[in-house]
Amino acid sequence: MTLQEIIDKSGHIVFFGGAGVSTASGIPDFRSAKGIGGKKAEEILSHRYFMENPECFFEFYRKNLLFPEARPNAAHYKLAELERKGKLKAVITQNIDGLHRMAGSNTVYELHGNVNYNYCMECGKAFGLERILHSRGVPRCECGGIVKPDVVLYGEPLNEYMLRMANAYAMAAEAFIIGGTSLSVYPAGDLADSYMRSRLVIINETPTELDKRADLVIRGRIEDVLKSIII
């Protein structure tokens, strides 16, 4: 069965995506040769480092994780179109760039948070991305508290509500499409395990740990594969 046939025959599709969904928008992934990952990056992007060295954290964060000029690509727009047509019921993403929402998707579960949302650690006041972009050093609230990005750092737990909803949608899906992720980090494998039906699709440029379990594996860039779908 082809991807087009799976989409045509499914009325309850769920998409789970990783960094590869946004690379065509100019946002680097985390673990490839051109990505920003590595032990040093993981150390800086940890809760412990944030608390102990906030100024160094924000210097790295602004340079490597914020791309205010980035815009959705063909993958984001096709997923939003699938939702408008009633085929796609939810997008679950590991990305923090907010591009799915910018493209028009409404039911989006951002497991690792969103750079566009920030809050004061003292009074809880909410701030947009501009507060981080237009400040120097450690961004602070009027009350003096540190303004923290609402993203999940290493050493922090995932949002339990987001995780529960993601698993619920994965369990209820007629077709579960995974794209742009190597499935090597939690909770990727667990979400795939929640899907028990026979329309598990993996779209990725490189092999993943779950290829053997998938009903359809497509090697390629997620934006190229999805834009060819006719709805």
Image (cartoon, helix red, strand yellow):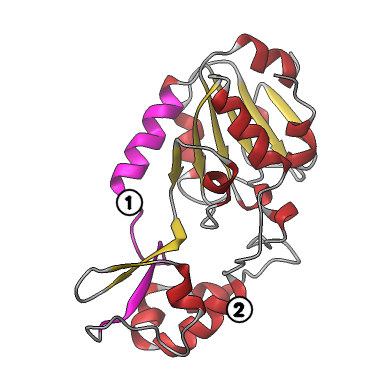
The x, y position of residue 125, in whole percent, is: 25, 69
Taking the spot 67% from the left edge, 61% from the top edge, the residue there is: 27
User: Where on the picture, by quarter, is residue 119?
Assistant: bottom left
The answer to whether one can see residue 40 in this image is no
Q: Residue 223, located in which quarter of the rendered image?
A: top right
Asked if labels 1 and 2 touch by Cβ distance under 8 angstroms, the answer is no
Q: Secondary structure at mark 1?
A: loop
Farthest top residue?
9
Residue 146 within the magenta-colored segment of the rendering: yes
**Image quarter hosting the N terminus:** top right
- The residue at 59%/34% (across/down) is 80
Report the residue marked by disc 1: 159
Q: Which residue is mark 2?
A: 63
Q: State the residue in front, 188 or 69.
A: 69
Residue 220, position in %: x, y?
80, 39
* Mark 1 Cα-neighbour bin, 10 Å: few <14, some 14–19, many ≥20: some
> What's the CA distance linking mark 2 and mark 1?
25 Å
Q: Earlier in the sequence, mark 2 or mark 1?
A: 2
125 horizontally vs 223: left or right: left
In the rendering, at what x and y percent does residue 157 appear? 33, 58
Q: Residues within 10 Å of mark 2 (few under 14, many from 20)?
A: few
Relative to 74, does residue 143 appear above or below in the rendering?
below
* In this picture, residue 21 sits left or right of residue 117: right
Quarter of the rendering occupied by the C terminus:
top right
Percent x, y for residue 189? 51, 40
Residue stretch in magenta: 145-171
Q: Is 143 rendered above or below residue 75? A: below
Give the label on residue 198, or none: none
Mark 2: secondary structure: helix
